[in-house]
Amino acid sequence: MTYRSRQFVGALLLLVAALLGIRNPLAHEARPLHVRIETLAAGAYQVTIRAPESIAIDNLPWVQWPDTCASPAGDAANSALQHYLLRCSGDLAGAEIAIRYPLFNPVITTLITWAERPNADLHVVLRPTESTWRVPKTPGSQHVPTAYLRLGMEHILTGADHLLFIGALLAIAGAGRRIVLAVTGFTLAHSLTLTLAALEFVAIPIPPTEVAIALSIAFLARELVLPNDRSLTRRRPFLVATCFGLLHGLGFAAALREVGLPQRDILIALVSFNLGVEAGQILFIAMALIALWLVEKTIVNFQRGKLIARSPMTIPALGYGIGATAAFWCMQRILVWQVGF
């Protein structure tokens, strides 16, 4: 496949992802619903429920507790952040709890933190198709790697803006060696800032970070429409990917900071989350390259590249489409940041 053919197919796939991303203007909002249950005394628990901002106010979830527990007044949630004291006639260990939505589950992962005793948190990730969880009688830290690995994978695979950025890098880089350089730079950079921010060596507010991530996609959209000799990303893929990777790592850390790190297993959780992000990224890149290969075998060779020759403005048009999506995300995030709209 020629370099221009790769650009065309890659940009076409990116436009599809961009159009899907418009359905969720806060595309970076891939954070889970977080339910924390902390044992205070026998039969007494402090419950904290933190819902992501992407959930509509009339669809905020609540937890359905066992019959042995006195549910708080009004099960229907009215706030994205809830704190209340739960009293039960018996121990929650071994009991089943359920996550309920008034309307529907908007494809949101649930992270449950079960703090039975200090510094011994158990973290469990429920997929959007899973609504119930049975509290274990003998929790242990062995669940931490699995939970945070899944959380990292689901964060990257459900983050339309991160995928759009990575896909744009692939489309612009084009050749094998250049793709490796771009992906390597992005991976090293976001792993660094993810670690520093998660361990609180670096503290940057989430809203401006999300705005900057949207702007990074707009920058790559502009690079798509520039001639080869004027495109910085085509000439220096490693440099551009590394610089913006530092920014995207802060976005990953924001999601991790929302759910917290278990103090007893902080290193295990951090490494597992990072590995999950990398696994999801590799999976997406593999799928994108396979799609390019299939198109090369079934469409481009069959057409002998005539489609590209007949439509010289196709790639710029797709670049403008991706740029418009990034601008929409940017404006939406600024509104949420400044006025809470």
Image (tube, helix red, strand yellow):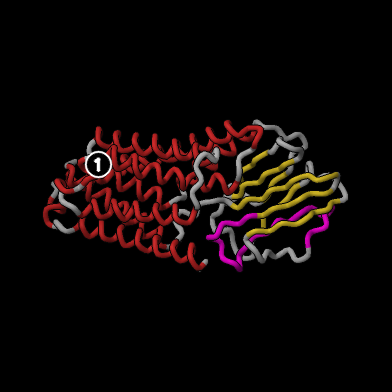
In the picture, measured across the screen, residue 113 lies left or right of residue 5, that is right
Position in image of residue 88 (x %, y %): 84, 51
**132 and 26: which is toward the camera:** 26
Q: Residue at x 65, y 58 (%)?
A: 81
Looking at the rendered structure, the secondary structure element under dot 1 is helix
Report if residue 57 lies within the magenta region: yes
Residue 14 percent coordinates (x, y): 32, 52
Q: Is residue 93 left or right of residue 10?
A: right
Q: Which residues are magenta?
A: 50-72
Q: Position of residue 12 (x, y in %)?
A: 28, 53
Q: Check disc 1 and report the residue beneath it.
A: 173
Image-quadrant location for residue 135: top right
Between 293 and 208, the residue placed more toward the observer is 208
Residue 245's place in the image compared with 306, above or below, is above
User: How many numbered markers are drawn?
Assistant: 1
Q: Mark 1 Cα within 10 Å, few/some/many (few <14, many 20+)?
A: many
